[in-house]
Image (cartoon, rainbow, N blue to C red):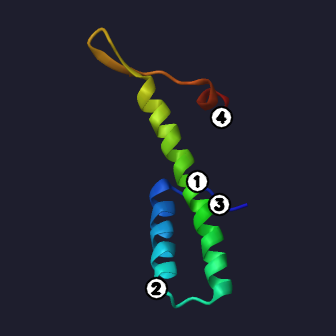
Amino acid sequence: MREKQSFEDDLKKLQKIVEELSSGKLTLGESLKKYEEGIKLAESCSKELQGAERKVELLMKKDGKFALEKFAEEEEK
């Protein structure tokens, strides 16, 4: 299992993989390996974005102030 990295790091790696795949300079084997890595990174980024979206949805205006409420998934960590 890969080490947890930041969203920004994963996104940069994913962008690099897309550039490498688009270059046409990789062998078929290298392309398949990069593609698999890219899929994992894309899933990780998507999951991170979904979590951020849930947090934004929980941001509510109460008595003129904004408050972020924790959701069950976050409390379990």
Mark nearer the N terminus (4 vs 2)? 2
| On-image quarter of the N terminus | bottom right
At mark 3, the secondary structure is loop
Residue identified by numbered label 2: 23
User: Nearer the observer, disc 1 or disc 3?
Assistant: 1
Mark nearer the N terminus (3 vs 4)? 3
Residue identified by numbered label 3: 3
Residue identified by numbered label 1: 44
At mark 1, the secondary structure is helix
Residue 67: % across, % down:
38, 20
Mark nearer the N terminus (2 vs 3)? 3
Residue 27: % across, % down:
62, 90
User: Nearer the observer, disc 2 or disc 3?
Assistant: 2
Is there CB contact under 8 Å for labels 3 and 4? Answer: no
Left or right: residue 46 versus residue 29 is left
Mark nearer the N terminus (4 vs 1)? 1
- Identify the residue at the far left of this view: 64
* Quadrant housing residue 26: bottom right
Residue identified by numbered label 4: 77
